[in-house]
Amino acid sequence: MPAEKNKNKTSGNNRPKKVTAGYLERAALHYLGRFSTSQSNLEAVLVRKIRRRNEGFAAPSDEQLTWVKDVVSKCVKYGYVDDSRYAQQRAESMLRRGKPVRMIAMDLKQKGISEEEIATTIETLQEESNVDMNRSAAAAFIKRRRFGCFRRPIEDREALLQKQQKELASMARAGFGFEISKEILGLAEDEIIELLV
């Protein structure tokens, strides 16, 4: 029972700890040790950390924002943060998971990658790939979800038509166009394997 007593007690010092430039640097390095990120996203992470530590979740002061900019610029200078490398890795990963080009571009934009960098990344991926990226992503998607030639055989014609409609709807929700979805769902397994990056 003594453990339960201590569990509900709070220490007398519940005030948030002070934010310093050193703290932000350590927080950034810890975050970068776990995740790859963009400059913009790292800034957002550090600002959230400041808000958590500021009394009453107050907005960061000008001095704190200057510290954030300094820490991010140091991380860029030392090569810990590289937007182009991050965009390339994230786009390749999303493509392998079956995300269409449009969704990849939207995700990169959300992470703070510039329009030019997004266009360059997608162009580079397309050059490296010997097939259309959207077709390749659709192939990865149906393989992962066990659609098309990867689904279990269905004997009943009406049940098969319903299943095909559900698969088309699922692909549309994932961001694939009707024509690509219909084409990829109709391919044989060996043709799908050829499309995978």
Image: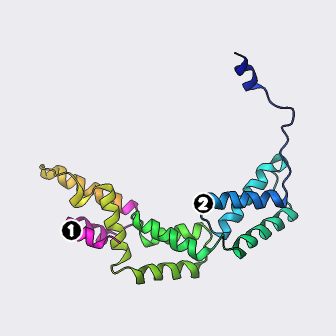
N-term mark: 2 or 1? 2
The residue wearing badge 2 is: 35
How crowded pointer 1 is (Cα within 10 Å; few <14, some 14-19, many 20+) is rated as few
Specify the color scheme.
rainbow
Q: Position of residue 135 (x, y in %)?
A: 33, 73
78 drawn magenta: no
Res. 31 image quadrant: bottom right
Q: Residue at x 51, y 68 (%)?
A: 90
Amino acid on which disc 1 is placed = Asp
Quarter of the image where the C terminus is located? bottom left
Viewer can see residue 187: no
State the residue position of label 1. Answer: 190
Secondary structure of residue under mark 1: helix
Mark 2 → mark 1, Cα distance in angstroms: 36 Å
Q: Which residues are magenta?
A: 172-197
Would you say 196 lies left or right of 153 here?
right
> From the viewer's perspective, is residue 122 above or below residue 59?
below
What kind of element bears circle 2?
A: loop
Q: Position of residue 119 (x, y in %)?
A: 52, 81
In the image: residue 58, left or right of residue 43: right
Task: Point out the image quarter for the N terminus.
Answer: top right
In the rendered image, the vertical position of residue 76 relative to residue 23, given as above or below: below
**Number of callouts in the render?**
2
